[in-house]
Amino acid sequence: MENKAINFEFTSYEFKPENGRVIFNYKTEFKDKEPIIWKEELILPQNIPAEIIESYKNQSNVKYKQINKILQSLHIILGISYYKFYPVANISFGPTVRTIGLSKNEAEFWNVVYKKGLGEFIYRNKLDFKKLPKFPYDNVIHNLIGDSELGIQSLDSLSVAGQATFRENNILTSKSYLVGVGGGKDSIVGIELLKESKENLLAFYVQTSIQSKNNLQSGLVDEVIKLTGLNEFKLQRVLDTKVLDNHQYNGHIPISAIYAFLGIFTSTIYNYKGFIVSNEYSSNFGNVKYKGQDINHQWSKTFEFENLFNKYIKENISNNLEYFSILRPFYEIKIAEMFTRYSKYFYIFSSCNQNFKSSESSKVKWCGKCAKCVFTFILLSAFLPKKQLINIFKNNLYKEENLLNLFKDILGIGKLKPFDCVGTFNEAQTAFKLAQVKYKNDFIMRQLEKKLNIDSSIFKIQKENLVPEKLIFTIFKKVLIIGYGKEGIASKKYLQKFFPHLKIGIADSKQGRGYLDKQLNYDIAIKTPGIKKELISIPYTTATNIFLSNVVDDNIVIGVTGSKGKSTTASLIYQILKDNNKDVELLGNIGKPMLEYLLEKPFDSAQGRPQNKIFVLELSSYQLDDIKFSPHIAVVTNLFPEHLDYHNNLNNYYNAKKNIIKFQNKNNYFVYNKNNKLLDKWVKDYNGNAVKFENSNLKSNLLGEHNSSNIGASVAVAKILNISEELCAKSIENFKSLPHRLEYIGQYNNINFYDDAISTTPDSTIMAIQALCKIGKITTIFLGGQDRGYDFRKLEKILKKHNIKNIVLFPDSGNKILKSRKGFNILETKSMKQAVDFAYKNTGNNEICLLSCASPSYSVWKNFEEKGDLFKKFVILLSKNEK
């Protein structure tokens, strides 16, 4: 009778930081025989930092929780090496690890990793996916990243933390990345590209052995690392000797997933930025379907796994740790082409599996018989001279008749895509055809050349990738700036200064209708905010994302957005911080491009990255629409319909605004208006510290209830940074209104003129009317501009309620603002001079004339600034001629 496994237990793990050892224990239990006890050990090569040892002893702080969670994760992923011998649906956790537990999301993650990571194993052994476990979970969600309570916080309780503690919790201090090295061309290309970034890099390598008796790695990786010039971090993984015994089943496991967790574990212990791998786009494509499931030998190298793993790490370990593939945008054939630049590695590298079967370096790097050898030979044959390639492989594989069926399988005209790390059929066929002239007389080429085709699309850069903005210009060489206004000009200067090797192109609407067609000739675009993302057909970034990628790790970023009040609020926050001796800069949509700041200031770091500053950024919905970072403190002043022509609908507009908190973590803050019900809904699924603000009664020169709200938001931010309300009051009292924001122009000919050109929606104009009606009588107002389909019914009621009789209507929306013109004195014009002349003739003594158009300016003027400046100009000029 067969001995049947009934349970697999993740028994226990033990971390010994003093001697750099981690021990993992497992148990396979059977119905009719004694259990098999498994033991695996990790050996760390360097002394573990004293603070890590101390925090692990204390068992209470954030670092301890992070370490314990990554150890639990390692316990589960390393256990797959022993689980596979006797796969069983039942699993359990030993009493010492059961107390940590898994959340529902974590359990789902592990269900997917075991199911898809063991897909090839299930297929080859003709098993049922039902044999795989369903990981148990607790209904209680564990807060394992930070100590802070979630939800609404009182300002008083937040203020005691102070700026120093806030900075410590939010800024990553590590300066180095671990980079995986495997000995093949991919990791070589990845490292060489990364070296151009001037980032601090450490070659990461997992040396696997069986109880120290049988090293499963060759000296190949050591040779490659030596040529890279990088220092190395070699982690030892010692497997249980019983893996060499005969067991019920054996087969492939998701080794790249194991390396991913080991890299993040090492990053956590030694405070590195994260772990970079060199997985290509081609790995996304599987081998075969089995029982309705896609079977992919390389699943744990796919973008799907990369995304899942990133989410798991950021939710459960640390929001600061990074994991990504530097080569994700490229097909394998493109990587092979890039590899030919680095000739010093030609006779060292190998991806043939024979190099990973002994502790001695093989004299022959390539066996010339396996799928990896054949696929690599095909790719390189397209780019290297024939003689050089044959010298590398010590053989011309196109002459080997016995390899015909293997060639067919790799080229997609055989039985099945080989279960090895090989690329897609299209790229194999394309490389084969590109090599046709050089190898036209060889057997394999003569047999297959007429059955194959070239697919040029595989050389294109793929959009799907998680490469950080600060590194993208090390892998992409041709950059197109789309939109060449103030921000586009700053972007070009930034690239020229820090990345002089790049080919830079410009695409702007001034160049004609076909300006966007230029994208076809470039690797990546920098999109300016006014260009809709739907118009971009190649990978792209933005100046906002480039800037944030350079500052979020080492500085405090305060982002301010809202339908109205964001400029005033951002300026108030800046003034309060500056008056209280903070090293602060005000940038963004308020006027100064962010990248312009990086150009002007001398910094010590290689790529112009400042440190230990506070940045206050005004962020528009255009900038937030495709943002990849959130500020440490996010402020939303208010929300109402705006920019519907750009975002297509109101929901898209609000979602763009919500991105300001999308990437925040448990140590970050969301400061929002307590009177906005939509913002209250955002808090329900928010992970950070939500801080409600209300209108402030502090003395100021700013008019209107909306400005009292702006002041309240500014004070809330100041308190988070440990600045008292008393200190805020001094700054607020001296603060002057910004240009074109209910700005008092003065009294001319006994008429009070106010410039509120910034108001480009009905809601903001209503706020301006309500503010001014508290201090005087408005009898003249200028309305209209670009037609964005706004609903003006409420505005019309307000005009009638406050008896505003004299109305100037500018095109195009002017003729849609009033449903009934009865009782109004109306001038329709596109001339600001005529409008101001009308105001002088119809506005009474001590009454108010207000420029607040409830529509964007673009139908008549370049922007609201030009409109407001013209208003001021003619108010002054015409005052001499009137009355």
Image (cartoon, helix red, strand yellow):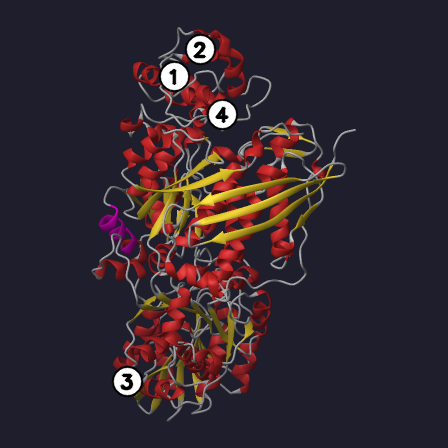
Image height of 398 relative to 423, above or below: above
Q: Are marks 1 and 3 in contact (CB under 8 Å)?
A: no
- Tag 2 near tag 4, CB within 8 Å: no
Of circles 1 and 3, which is in front? 1
Judging depth in this view, the residue of 857 and 208 nearest the camera is: 208
Which of the two labelled residues, at mark 1 and mark 2, occupies the earlier sequence position? 1
Residue assigned mark 1: 435
Badge 2 crowding class, 10 Å Cα cut-off, few under 14, some 14 to 19, many 20 or more, is: many
State the extent of the magenta-drawn residues as a range. Answer: 490-499
Above or below, comparing residue 411 to residue 227 in the picture: above
Q: Is residue 498 in the magenta section?
A: yes
Label 2 to label 4: alpha-carbon separation = 16 Å
For discs 2 and 3, the disc positioned in front in the rendered view:
2
The secondary element bearing badge 3 is classed as helix
Q: Could you say which is closer to the camera, residue 807 or residue 451?
A: 451
In this view, which residue lies farthest toward the left?
A: 602
Work out how far the residue at label 3 is from the one at label 4, CA to CA, in angstroms.
75 Å
Q: Position of residue 146 (x, y in %)?
A: 50, 65
The kind of residue on which mark 3 rests is Ser
Q: Residues within 10 Å of mark 1 (few under 14, many from 20)?
A: many
Q: Sequence order check: which comes first, mark 2 or mark 4?
A: 4
Residue drawn at (38%, 65%) of the image:
860
Please state, as top left, top right, bottom left or bottom right, where the C terminus lies in the image.
bottom left
The circle drawn on residue 879 is 3
Q: Residue furthest right?
A: 1
Decide which of tag 3 and tag 4 comes sooner along the chain. 4
SS at circle 2: helix
- Residue 72 visible here: yes
Q: Disc 1 vs disc 2: Cβ atoms closer than 8 Å? A: yes
> Total of numbered circles in the picture?
4
Using residue 143 as the reference point, say whether residue 473 is left or right of it: left
